[in-house]
Image (tube, rainbow, N blue to C red):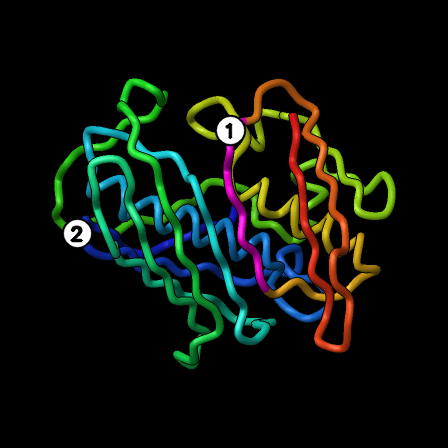
Amino acid sequence: DLAFSGSRSAGLATNTMAITDGLRDTRGVRLGVLATLVDVSGAGVALHAVAPDWIATADLQVHVLRPTTSGSLTIDCRPLRVGARRIVVDAELRDDDGALCGTGRMAFARIPGRATRATITDDDSPTSFRMDGGRPIDDSVTERCGMEIVGPGQLRFDKSPYVENSFGTVNGGVLALGAECAAVSAAGGGHAQDLHIHYLEQIGDGPVAVTAEVVRDDDSGSLCTVRIED
């Protein structure tokens, strides 16, 4: 539904995503949406680097340098390290004018290809693609994922087929979106601009519970710690 388009190979992925109303909050594209774009784009690079093995996101960082409100976002992802057990990918986000508006870094665990229902070839040749056939998100992306704020800093959503990945667990970008929403709720509102998420274990049974707590609040903004449980 995010309708990425672009090209990818073992050494580079360049994806573009149109900005729709449902992907924004009061200031720009939601941090959780950017995290999803970073995660999926970085995974495209890492998968080609390790095929026929597979990957799982272990660590994800996204830093927003300035909000982007309209047009489209383009992301460039490059492998920083491809190891026997860990792959690290760096990302840069740019607006339609080519200005840098965010950065990202991902660490992926290398796992056997049999762990997933999906497949990929080990062909390193550049491939152009467009992920389409979905429904453009003009309504709220959080509502599309079934997320509900049930109290200050408290969010819940079902483990529905819509939010699952090829492992049958919850997509990492969806978890990042849930973390962002819970943190904004705990802080009393605002626009989240930095996220660092550690994926400790796959989500088992739903529903998913997300709990955020403010650990610092001053003139520079709020810092929250977030816990996600199945």
Left or right relative to 91: residue 178: right
The image's mark for residue 201 is 1
The image's mark for residue 109 is none
**What segment carries the magenta color?**
194-202
- Vertical comparison of 101 with 44: above or below: below
- Label 2 environment density (alpha carbons within 10 Å; few <14, some 14–19, many ≥20): few
Q: Which residue is drawn at 17% across and 52% down?
A: 126
| Occupied quadrant, residue 211 | top right
Amino acid at circle 2 = Pro
Q: Nearer the viewer, residue 213 or 10?
A: 213
Residue 203 rendering spot, x and y as whole percentages: 56, 26
Q: Which residue is drawn at 15% across and 36% down?
A: 122
- Mark 1, secondary structure of its residue: loop
Labelled pair 2, 1 in contact (Cβ < 8 Å): no
Q: Residue at x 29, y 18 (%)?
A: 114
Residue 128 rendering spot, x and y as whole percentages: 25, 52
- Label 1 environment density (alpha carbons within 10 Å; few <14, some 14–19, many ≥20): few
First in sequence: mark 2 vs mark 1: 2
Q: Nearer the viewer, residue 171 or 4?
A: 171
Residue 102 rendering spot, x and y as whole percentages: 47, 69
- Mark 2, secondary structure of its residue: loop
Q: Disc 2 to disc 1, how far (Cα)?
A: 33 Å
Residue at the farthest right position: 151
Left or right relative to 128: residue 190: right
The image's mark for residue 126 is 2
Q: Which residue is drawn at 50% across and 49% down?
A: 36
| Occupied quadrant, residue 188 | bottom right
Q: Which of 127 and 170 is in front in this view?
A: 170
